[in-house]
Amino acid sequence: MPSLKTVVKPHSREIIAGKAKNIEDYLDIQYHHFAKIAGNTYPHAIIDSIDCSEAYRLRAVEVVTYKDVSGVSAVGYIPAMPTLAVGKARFLGEPVAIVVAKTPGEAERAISGVKVEYRKLPALTSIDDSLSSKEVLIHDSYKRTIAYRFLVKKGNIDRVFSKADVVIKNRYKVSSREHAYVERSNAPRNRH
């Protein structure tokens, strides 16, 4: 039997004490910019318009919408997951616009100046509804409510179950979770 040994994460004491160095500690603040994301306010809706004129009234503010992202606005390995909502919002909080400003306060004020007009669509509020729905399409181009299907197969599951002393089959519901980063998300770059 392998011996178990406690491993202390490097710098854990500094992190807990709030003394750990983050990327912001190494950068010159005059070159920082701060971003805020305007999220969709409905679980399923057509985006009729995005008006950024009020946000632009603040100095040194830039606003990015899907119109500013050339080509396919997608990120990650799931093809139906655009960086910013394009014409239709598919989940509550889906990013619709990004505001970039010189200070966090300016970004906060500017994000409230992004006005989006929506046309609400029927929403699917459970996995069961989503799997069985024939009328409501979340992903029009895929003609289905599921963003992506893929199979993960490792080992022989039938053999594992056949050797198990007890098999418990049930349905479980868990609350949503979000990462809790110690430092802000950032993307440092060379300013030259």
Image (cartoon, helix red, strand yellow):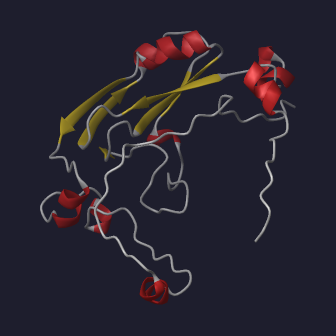
Rendered residue at 39%/40% (across/down): 94
Rendered residue at 46%/63% (across/down): 79
Q: Residue furthest left?
A: 135
Rendered residue at 26%/29% (across/down): 117
Question: Can you tell which quarter of the image residue 40 is in?
Answer: top left
The vertical placement of 95 against 111, above or below, is below
Q: Is residue 191 left or right of residue 159?
A: right
Q: Quadrant of the C terminus?
A: top right
Q: Nearer the viewer, residue 42 or 179?
A: 179
Q: Is residue 167 left or right of residue 14?
A: left
The vertical placement of 4 against 101, above or below, is below
What is the tally of numbered marks visible in this picture?
Answer: 0
Any part of residue 17 in sight: yes
> Picture coordinates of residue 49 (x, y %)?
30, 32
> Picture coordinates of residue 112 (x, y %)?
41, 16
Question: Can you tell which quarter of the image residue 91 is in?
Answer: top left
The vertical placement of 118 against 106, above or below, is below
> Picture coordinates of residue 100 (x, y %)?
58, 24
> Picture coordinates of residue 53 (x, y %)?
42, 18
Any part of residue 27 in sight: no
Q: Quadrant of the N terminus?
A: bottom right
Rendered residue at 45%/43% (across/down): 84
Question: Can you tell which quarter of the image residue 51 is in?
Answer: top left
The vertical placement of 12 against 104, above or below, is below
